[in-house]
Amino acid sequence: MKKQMIRKVRQRSRTTRARRTKVRKRSKFVRKKGTKRLKKALRVQNVPRKVLLPTDKRIGVVLSVQNEAQTLPLVLRELSRLPLHELIIIVNGSTDASLSLARNVPGATVVHYQEPVGHDVGRAIGAKLATSDILVFVDADFIIPAERLVPFVTAVDRGMDVALNNISPYLKPSRSLDRVTYLKEFLNRILGRPDLRANSLTAVPHAISRKALDMIGCHQLMVPPKAQASAIIKGLVVGAPGSVEVLKANRHKAGNVGRMNMVSELIAGDHLEALQFAMDELGGRLWFSDHGRRRDLLGGA
């Protein structure tokens, strides 16, 4: 009797296990099939979702391009998600398919220079051609999701004149900072803006209001730190409302490798030029007081 009961219990347990295994296989098949259908639907649609901007002002983008045929299509795809009034593409010194890709963008204004003119000069040219109320500056060497540009536009729409990229979260501890980062922070400090830390118009993305462009002058954008110094001295609202990681993307480019490289030399010189500009505008001591020092007693100036 006991043996018969044990056999029945074993048979039931085997049947239960078999049923469970069957259900698991079936559910696994359903999940797999559902995933395939979803992926197929996404491939068929292949339509980027639009990103709405909380403003009724005209938004323009200046895109600087130099031999960026690999990343340019993806950069343009992200920009197409924004409701832009204008897109100005500056293609300079490109020997790849960058120009051809840019010319195929519907409604874009394409400016082409066979020789390299520099990203900063390209941005200044784009700013001069633009008619938008808010101008966003990006480069084509790395992809920025459209959503990450919204904080810059929103900040300018709400009254900020120069919206910088806040790179502070991505910087190393102060003991490990390079000299270019020190120069950026030094310039902000002597201009009375230590809160800006090492954030600079040198880094994209950033956005500028029409008011700021008119007051600073588009030509000043050829030397970004100089334009930033001018904005601060003129009392414009300068802040860093958004953060986009650009340090890794720019780290291993030609001319940007090693402690003494071409790009760091250029940026260092830009900050020295900005410092000279500030001294010309405000005097040799900027707005730092001489604290009652009577230089005139010894005929000193």
Image (tube, rainbow, N blue to C red):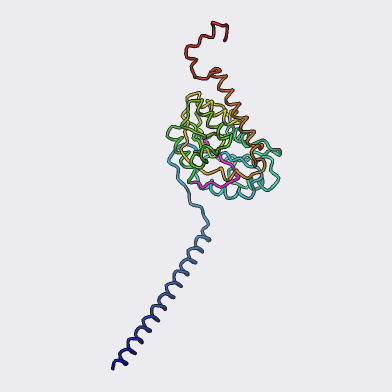
Residue 143 part of the magenta segment:
yes
In what quadrant of the picture does the N terminus appear?
A: bottom left
Residue 106 part of the magenta segment:
no
Range drawn in magenta: 135-146
Of the pair 3 and 287, the residue shown nearer to us: 3
Residue 75 placement (x, y as % from top left): 57, 47
Residue 291 placement (x, y as % from top left): 47, 14
Residue 9 placement (x, y as % from top left): 32, 86
In what quadrant of the picture does the C terminus appear?
A: top right
Of the pair 99 and 295, the residue shown nearer to us: 295
In the figure, residue 19 lies in which quadrant?
bottom left
Is 300 drawn above or below residue 218 in the view shown?
above
Which residue extends farthest front?
A: 175
Is 244 drawn above or below residue 33 in the view shown?
above
Is 10 drawn above or below residue 126 in the view shown?
below
Residue 189 placement (x, y as % from top left): 50, 28
